[in-house]
Amino acid sequence: MYGWKKVYRNILVVGILLAFNTGLSQASPITIEAQGSFTVGGSYKQHEGTWVQENFISEAGQRAYGDFAYVEYQKPINAKKLPLIFQHGGAQSKRTWESGPDGREGFNTMFLRAGYSVYLVDQPRSGEANLSTEAVTPDTPWASNPMYGDKTLYVLSRIGHYDENGNPVPNAQFPDGETNYQAFQQSWTIGSGPLDNDLNADVLTKLFQQQKDGAVLVSHSMGGTIGWRAAIRTDKVKAIIAYEPGGTPFLFPQTEMPRINEARFKALSASAVGVPMDDFLKLTKIPIILYYGDYIKMGSENVGEDKWGTEYAMAQQFVETINRHGGDAMLVHLPDIGIKGNSHFLMQEKNNRQIMELALKWLHEKGLDG
């Protein structure tokens, strides 16, 4: 009998060591108090005429619903006071915050393990909220199928480059291999209606207003401008963590517009819009932090590096303007603090736990982790 116990113990020890070495030790069970999904906002258009069963597929007399957000949430036992609301970027969805291309744990469950309730948003006309009351217009970004853009999106996102044979070569922190390349390319979504940053901000604001004590916004890329606008619309946004905001306008006081640095391809240049000073000053009332990864350089021959060089320069001016008016904004360029090799999708890469822990430390420093 003793011999079997010894064998079992040895098997258990080996299993624990294997789990540790493969990273599975981090995948301990999470106790959830509540989870679910719901929609926020939305509207409908009424078609003229009268609906009759004899012509039940006719548009006459029917409504077209759309322009809402889809929200998926999880709340851990003994959750912290302020939940985290995650806003994705352009041509993306809530998948941004879920498992990475190689299956590694995503921010959604990482922050859940840290005690935060997590709300993942599919913004209007994207992902699982893809009903629109407006038809796609010629200027709707990434609106067509098939979407022939794998190389464009790979380079613009600074995931890597291509060798002389056209094979993808990932940057340091992005997991390599054809399987991971394909998983990344399958994360994109098409726009089902015109991109409307104010509509998206209005709907996001409604979600924040449902939070009794407010919430912390976590945004990415084109979601940056949606976040700035939501924080102007409601005082329920208690802080903003923005991962590489850009691709849509930064906000500035109308009387203090920034310098525009043009990218090699002018349409990719960072942009800004002016708002009344009273609105801008609302951004000075909450702590804001912006994180940018590696491979950012204006004037680079790499289109993505050059484009994000202009965005980073705009972010510098944005942060400076907020702080000049008494705000609390911080810009972190990861290579400057010794974290190198990250692309635009830093939340999905090999060191995403290290990236996430930076945010945890900041939340603690700001007293937002109670």
Image: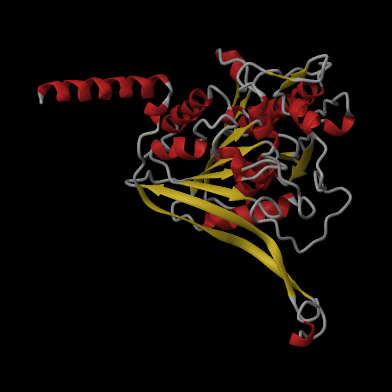
Q: Nearer the viewer, residue 191 or 43?
A: 191
Q: Is residue 133 above or below residue 202?
A: below
Residue at the extreme left: 1
Q: Nearer the viewer, residue 322 or 311?
A: 311
User: Which of the 4 image quadrants contains residue 283?
Assistant: top right
Residue 199 in view of the camera: yes
Where in the figure is residue 65, as x and y percent of width and height?
70, 68
How many numbered discs?
A: 0
User: Which of the 4 image quadrants contains residue 260?
Assistant: top right
Quadrant showing the N terminus:
top left
Residue 52 in view of the camera: no
Quadrant showing the C terminus:
top left
360 displayed left or right of 77: right
User: How is the rendered protein coloured?
Assistant: secondary structure
Where in the figure is residue 11, as x and y percent of width and height?
27, 23
Where in the figure is residue 162, as x and y percent of width and height?
78, 19
353 displayed left or right of 271: left
Name the residue located 75 percent from the left edge and 39 percent from the top edge.
Answer: 249
Q: Nearer the viewer, residue 353 or 366?
A: 353
Name the residue located 61 percent from the left edge and 53 percent from the top edge.
Answer: 204
Q: Is residue 275 above or below residue 137?
A: above
User: Which of the 4 image quadrants contains residue 187?
Assistant: top right
64 displayed left or right of 10: right
Where in the figure is residue 113, as x and y percent of width and height?
39, 37
Name the residue located 53 percent from the left edge and 22 percent from the top edge.
Answer: 351
